[in-house]
Amino acid sequence: MLYQNKAINNVKEFKYISDLGNFNSIPKPYKEISHSDFWQYYDTWAYSYTEFRQTYDINEGKNGMVPIEIFYYDTCAYARDKNHGVGVGRYWRIGCDHKWVIEAAGECWSRSKCELCGAETESDSSDCHSYS
């Protein structure tokens, strides 16, 4: 179930995901990451959507499903194994390993686009000051 009242396959902003899969698979590409990498990103940025899936494809050939919770951000997604508590579960980063091209879009404003997947983002550095 994807929260925010949008069906996962209708959300077009996830350019960084090559295959959204279905409710019994994890979106691709994905790679397993450490507990600290997951929590550093999770605690730093606000995610746009969350989703719960029961997946077969990350169960390493064992019978049964792995329940995961996926957190979708602007340029990547992260997932965690719902079978375990904080610090002892498994974690994944979902999406492209971006190769960003950054261009100035104005004073203190930049626009970035990934050469690999086409994902885009804009940011305000807020550290430019013009004194006249």
Image (cartoon, rainbow, N blue to C red):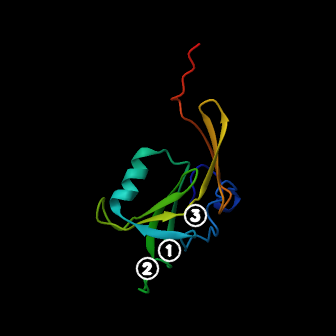
Q: Are marks 2 and 1 in contact (CB under 8 Å)?
A: yes
Residue 42 placed where, x, y %?
42, 51
Q: Which residue is mark 1?
A: 55
Which quadrant would the C terminus be assigned to in this image? top right
The quarter of the picture where residue 100 lies is bottom right
Q: Residue type at mark 1: give it.
A: Thr
| SS label for mark 2 | loop
Upstream in sequence: badge 3 or badge 1? 1
- From the viewer's perspective, tell me whether residue 42 is left or right of residue 8: left
Foreground: 12 or 82?
12
Kind of residue sitting beneath label 2: Asn
Per the model, the C-alpha gap separating discs 3 and 1 is: 20 Å
Name which residue lies at 38% across and 51% down: 40
Which mark is drawn over residue 12?
A: none
Q: What secondary structure is marked by label 1?
A: strand
Within 10 Å of disc 2 (Cα), the crowding (few <14, some 14-19, many 20+) is few
> As rendered, which of 115 and 44 lies closer to the eye?
115
Q: Are marks 3 and 2 in contact (CB under 8 Å)?
A: no
Can you say whether 99 is above or below 48 in the image? below
Q: Give, as a three-letter code, the residue at label 3.
A: Cys
**Residue to which mark 3 is pinned:** 96
Mark 3 surroundings: few (<14), some (14-19) or many (≥20) residues within 10 A:
many
Q: Which residue is mark 2?
A: 59
**In percent of the image, x 57 and y 20: which residue is there?**
130
